[in-house]
Amino acid sequence: MDFTISERMETVLGMIREFVEKELQPLEFLFLAEPFRDLLPKLEEKRALVKQMGLWAPNHPEALGGMGLDLVDHGLVSEALGGSPIGHFVFGCQAPDAGNIEILHRHGTEDQKSRWLRPLVDGDIRSCFSMTEIDMPGSNPVLMETTAVHDGGDYVINGRKWFTTAADGAAFAIVMAVTNPDEPPHARASMILVPTDTPGFEIVRNIAVMGEPGDDWLSHSEIAYRDCRVPRSNLLGTEGRGFVIAQERLGPGRIHHCMRWLGICRRSFDLLCRRAVSRPIAPGKVLADKEIIQGWIAESAAEIEAARALTLQTAWKIERHGWKEAREEISMIKFLVAGTMLRVVDRALQAHGGLGMTDDTPLAFWYRHERAARIYDGPDEAHKQSLAKRILKRYRA
């Protein structure tokens, strides 16, 4: 495996890092202090600059207006963008739109692509992905109560979802619903496009995450589908393939998540080190003189590099052999990188003392919102159990 970065990517990454530092980090105080919707005009100005620089939508095909980067190169970009909470949004590769674009590109009909895909890539609209249910375990996505029943040429959808990220202000949802209840568990659900102005689609609330309900893209909604009727032509792919398509989405999506988390690690580590060398604790002494702080810095540096190496290796394997062949590595990075990020953020916050608890740095924001990294896309425990079973199966054989 050769992770040598091309000259083109060196230039791209340099441009992105400079943009994040000079254009986005100065906006973070407003991002942390104001409703997201109030900041949108400024963010749209930055998005226009990104497009002018030719850096828009790095992970999407050139034919759709993106940069067409492969998974490894986009992973490096995602790491650079992760240094700011608004990085991915400003560069047009934010979740959940990034995954929805992949689904539409692979499985959408020409009519679906014409109506939804290009405006989504261009950043003219947003979308959401509606899968997790209130009363069903997210760790077992084949258990689902939401149904989509045939009625003539339509589907009639009924059910309740929550933690549907960015539903507030989205133009459409991709909803997972049971269409084939008599089939085997992995062949019961389908993915269906639901415009959010469809009667019966109701955002019940934006869910408060550790006290913050958020708004617009920066939110997670509870959604009720009440006799929500859409044409059967809104089906993505074929009936009963929803679980398979979701797995296609989640494999590369975990690379995006992990590299973003590593970007958070880098920024938090930088804040930790800067704080350590500048914070006086006694005459002639600073925080960095404490052995425990030195230990945190050494451990953080080693953990970040180890997590990064495994994530890039996993991206490389997915690119060459497909996500199925990289299932073990995908499970590994999901819990390894999430845990690394949370430890690094916690150390940086602790080193900042009372300042770390405020929104004068992004550390408290990440501490609140990224704790969910050990839960979404499969909780740590599910990934560890799945990985261990695969390993032990070889020994039992």
Image (cartoon, rainbow, N blue to C red):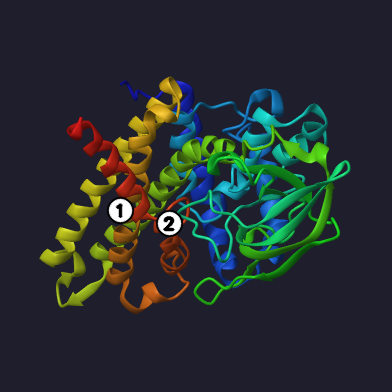
Residue at 16% across, 78% down = 282
Upstream in sequence: badge 2 or badge 1: 1
* Mark 2: few/some/many CA within 10 Å (<14, 14-19, 20+): many
- Distance, label 2 to label 1, CA atoms, is 11 Å
Q: Is residue 130 above or below residue 60?
A: below
- What residue is disc 1 on? 340
What number of labels is visible? 2
Name the quadrant of the N terminus. top left
Is any part of residue 294 visible from this angle?
yes
| Residue that sits furthest to the front in the current view | 182
Residue 99: percent from left, percent from top? 59, 41
What's under tag 2, amino acid-wise?
A: Ala
What is the quadrant of residue 295 in the picture? bottom left
What's under tag 1, amino acid-wise?
A: Thr
* Mark 1: few/some/many CA within 10 Å (<14, 14-19, 20+): many
Most foreground residue, 332 or 131: 131
Residue 382: percent from left, percent from top? 37, 52
Residue 279: percent from left, percent from top? 26, 70
Q: Is residue 227 above or below residue 45?
A: below
Residue at 60% across, 53% down = 131
Q: Secondary structure at mark 1?
A: helix
Q: In this image, 153 relative to 96: left or right?
A: right
Residue 79: percent from left, percent from top? 43, 43
Residue at 21% across, 56% down = 297
| Residue that sits furthest to the left in the current view | 291
Q: In this image, 293 relative to 85: left or right?
A: left
Q: Is residue 361 above or below residue 320?
A: below
- What residue is disc 2 on? 373
Most foreground residue, 394 or 198: 394
| Residue that sits furthest to the right in the current view | 152
Q: Secondary structure at mark 2?
A: helix
Q: In this image, 203 relative to 287: left or right?
A: right
